[in-house]
């Protein structure tokens, strides 16, 4: 019984999602649409249809990588709100490498573009990491401000120095086709970014679980002073983990540019960095669950458009439901499994049942 | 910079600065209250947005700006209740709770605005019009800038000193600061930590909501999706820069407002340079100001830490 309760607690993000979908159905009802039809269309459009699934996977790539960019520093107790800016800087650096470097074999240039993107995002994570570690500044507010700066830098570059001539709104020249990422589903936009994302999630899981790095990060997250005392170089770790997180965010942006857009557009990320935060909490900060959480969230977003077409419901409702999901998941984290409390409760119940059974043979009742 | 010499241009520049500062001032001063109690209020952004949405819907449904003000405060307080329930009641990470509220508010306001305002979303809503204060408004330049304003601006003039007075000169303010610095001691002295934090969060969100009301009822008279556009985050930077003091936060907000007004003027002054180069000025100014001046600040000691009785 106790194990059952423990599993019930472990699955609490799932209960939270279900409650959020239930509350969200209230929002759908306001618009005069049947929530069941809407949800059926949503999930059919997101997961059960070849094109829909491809659309979901396209979004899974950046959302998963952004989720990993949030999870990694969160293990050390750092909240990286800057994934959005890191995505933009990654996209910028990889697009610059792809468009400005002299022509050379794609075998050399593609890795350079990818590394450039990771570096761009990494630098954008390094700045707040350094200021946090060596000047004790709040990483949350720094990363938020850096987001706005990065978005504006990309808009400036895509609308100024790198803008294609005669383009109706800011975007760069098209990147040569040899540099595009391979597709994973025939005839669709689904590209290899999502596979890299899943592979990196696995790597991260094993590094965090089985290496001293993971242990050091968890120790810093629990108690930085204790970690310092135990000989963990806390400050370099903070800088390093923010750089790595930024690089993951940068990869998300790189794959958006090389895998999907093939140009540097202004505002090319519709808030994927913030979806990463949702993924991190949906996955309970576990990189192994992150792909599932990212897949689910991407499905909600991709399915929202299908739903809008099918039942005429504003797709913004999905943003509201996404907000509800994170509120309820966040709230569910507040309910912690307490073995002692539950075993005492079960013991009391059993005693009570036994007593009640003795007095009124065979009429079990609840607690009175 | 030659506009600084011309009286008319100067008046325009200063009133633009003030206009751009006011929403941030409401949010930052509200944020001071909550952060002084030890609750990191990153939901200011969502509260501004909620306030703006409520103001638009209220003004649309009732036909008066006062209805808008009432609804705006109600929506922002609703966000405050959620934040208090999550961060104070359930004691989950305050930053997580705040981000959750911001995401919820963006989605909820966009969706409900389309449902409620629908086709009327772009029509002008009733708002507050400027009232010139006799005598004061005839002071050259400053009179026009400061004393030919609307009701919400005058409310801001009152709220900032009032907040300062409450925090530093009343018993409740002393409790508030004690809880933010050392909740265990405050609890031993018989102050209810969670109750004070609950009120602080509610007041803080309602004040940020006023900032949203100002945006809709005094500035643009329409609601647009995600119209808070990062103002809540600038307010957070401002209150750190203002050393968690309402007056300091006010000055920091005025500085950001001025840098914003300056970049707008630069945008119009040099049309051949892509405007994005200038629109990042306020964010770079906030960032640099934080890095340069906020290095040695001492935030409330217990900020961001949940309080559990008998906990560690």
Image (cartoon, coloured by chain):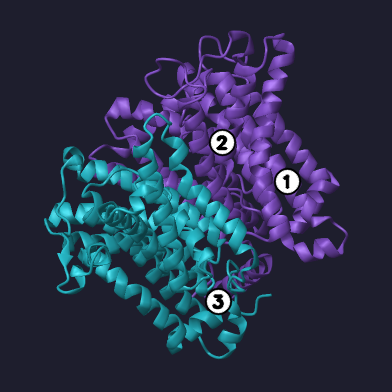
Chain colours: A purple, B cyan
Tell me if B56 is positioned left or right of A282 in this view: left
The answer to whether the residue labelled 1 contacts the one labelled 3, judged by CB atoms less than 8 Å apart, is no
Whole-number angstrom distance, CA of label 1 to CA of label 3:
30 Å
Does residue A289 appear in the picture of this structure?
A: no
Q: Which secondary structure lies at badge 3?
A: helix
In this view, the residue farthest toward the left is B63
Whole-number angstrom distance, CA of label 3 to CA of label 2:
37 Å
Depth order, front residue of A282/B259 = B259
Both labels 3 and 2 in a single chain: no
Both labels 1 and 2 in a single chain: yes
Q: Which secondary structure lies at badge 1?
A: helix
Q: Which residue is mark 3?
A: B180
Q: Which residue is mark 2?
A: A294
Tell me if B307 is positioned left or right of B225 in this view: right
Q: Which residue is mark 1?
A: A241
Depth order, front residue of B6/B125 = B6
Q: Which mark is residue A53?
A: none
* Chain name for mark 3: B
The relative height of residue B204 versus residue A203 in the rendered view (above or below) is below
Mark 1, Cα crowd under 10 Å, few <14 / some 14-19 / many 20+, is many
Depth order, front residue of A267/A359 = A267
In this view, the residue farthest toward the right is A231
């Amino acid at each position: 019984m106790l194990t059952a309760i423990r599993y019930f607690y472990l699955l609490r993000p799932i209960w939270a999602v279900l409650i959020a979908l239930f509350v969200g159905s209230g929002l759908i009802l306001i618009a005069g649409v049947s929530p069941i039809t809407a949800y059926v269309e949503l999930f059919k459009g997101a997961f059960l249809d070849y094109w829909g699934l491809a659309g979901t996977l396209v979004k899974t790539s950046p959302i998963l990588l952004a989720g990993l960019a949030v999870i990694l520093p969160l293990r050390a107790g750092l909240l990286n709100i800057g994934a959005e800016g890191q995505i933009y800087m990654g996209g910028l650096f990889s697009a610059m490498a792809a468009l400005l470097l002299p022509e050379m074999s794609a075998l050399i240039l593609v890795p350079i573009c990818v590394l450039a993107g990771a570096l761009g995002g990494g630098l954008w994570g390094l700045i707040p990491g350094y200021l946090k570690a060596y000047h004790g500044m709040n990483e949350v507010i720094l990363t938020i401000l850096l987001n706005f700066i990065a978005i504006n830098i990309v808009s400036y570059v895509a609308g100024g120095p790198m803008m294609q001539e005669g383009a109706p709104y800011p975007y760069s020249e098209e990147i040569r086709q040899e540099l595009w990422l391979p597709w994973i589903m025939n005839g669709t936009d689904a590209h290899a970014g999502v596979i890299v994302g899943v592979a990196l999630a696995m790597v991260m899981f094993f590094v965090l679980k089985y290496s001293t790095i993971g242990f050091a990060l968890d120790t810093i997250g629990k108690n930085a002073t204790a970690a310092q005392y135990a000989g963990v170089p806390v400050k370099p770790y903070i800088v390093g983990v923010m750089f790595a997180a930024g690089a993951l965010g940068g990869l998300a942006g790189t794959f958006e540019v090389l895998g999907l857009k093939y140009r540097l557009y202004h505002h090319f990320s519709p808030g994927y960095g913030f979806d990463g935060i949702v993924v991190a909490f949906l996955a309970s900060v576990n990189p192994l669950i992150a792909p599932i959480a990212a897949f689910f969230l991407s499905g909600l977003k991709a399915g929202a458009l299908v739903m809008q077409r099918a039942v005429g419901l504003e797709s913004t409702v999905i943003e509201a439901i996404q907000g509800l999901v994170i509120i309820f998941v966040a709230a569910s984290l507040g309910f912690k499994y307490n073995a002692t409390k539950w075993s005492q409760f079960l013991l009391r119940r059993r005693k009570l049942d036994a007593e009640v059974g003795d007095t009124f043979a065979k009429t079990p009742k609840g607690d009175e | 910079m030659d506009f600084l010499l011309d009286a008319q241009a100067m008046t325009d520049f200063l009133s633009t600065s003030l206009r751009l500062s006011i929403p941030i001032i409401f949010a930052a001063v509200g944020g001071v209250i909550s952060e002084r109690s030890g609750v990191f209020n990153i939901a200011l952004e969502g509260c501004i947005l909620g306030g703006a949405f409520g103001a638009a819907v209220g003004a649309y449904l009732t036909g008066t700006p006062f209805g808008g003000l009432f609804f705006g405060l109600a929506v922002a307080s609703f966000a405050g209740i959620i934040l208090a329930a999550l961060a104070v009641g359930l004691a989950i990470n305050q930053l997580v709770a705040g981000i959750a509220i911001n995401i919820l508010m963006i989605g909820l306001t966009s969706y409900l605005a389309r449902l409620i305002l629908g086709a009327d979303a772009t029509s002008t809503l009733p708002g507050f019009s400027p009232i010139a204060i006799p005598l004061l408004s005839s002071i050259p330049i400053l009179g026009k800038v400061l004393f030919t304003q609307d009701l919400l601006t005058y409310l801001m003039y009152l709220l900032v000193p009032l907040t300062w007075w409450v925090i530093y000169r009343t018993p409740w303010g002393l409790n508030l600061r004690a809880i933010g610095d050392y909740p265990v001691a405050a609890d031993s002295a018989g102050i209810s930590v969670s109750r004070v934090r609950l009120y602080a969060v509610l007041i803080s969100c309602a004040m940020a909501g006023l900032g949203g009301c100002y945006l809709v009822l005094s500035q643009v008279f329409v609601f647009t999706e995600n119209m808070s556009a990062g103002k809540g985050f600038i307010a957070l930077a401002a209150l750190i820069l203002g050393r968690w003091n309402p007056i300091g936060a006010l000055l920091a907000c005025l500085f950001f407002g001025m840098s914003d007004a300056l970049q707008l003027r630069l945008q119009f002054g040099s049309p051949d340079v892509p405007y994005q180069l200038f629109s990042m000025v306020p964010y770079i100014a906030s960032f640099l100001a934080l890095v340069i001046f906020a290095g040695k600040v001492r935030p409330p000691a217990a900020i961001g830490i949940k309080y559990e009785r008998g906990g560690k």
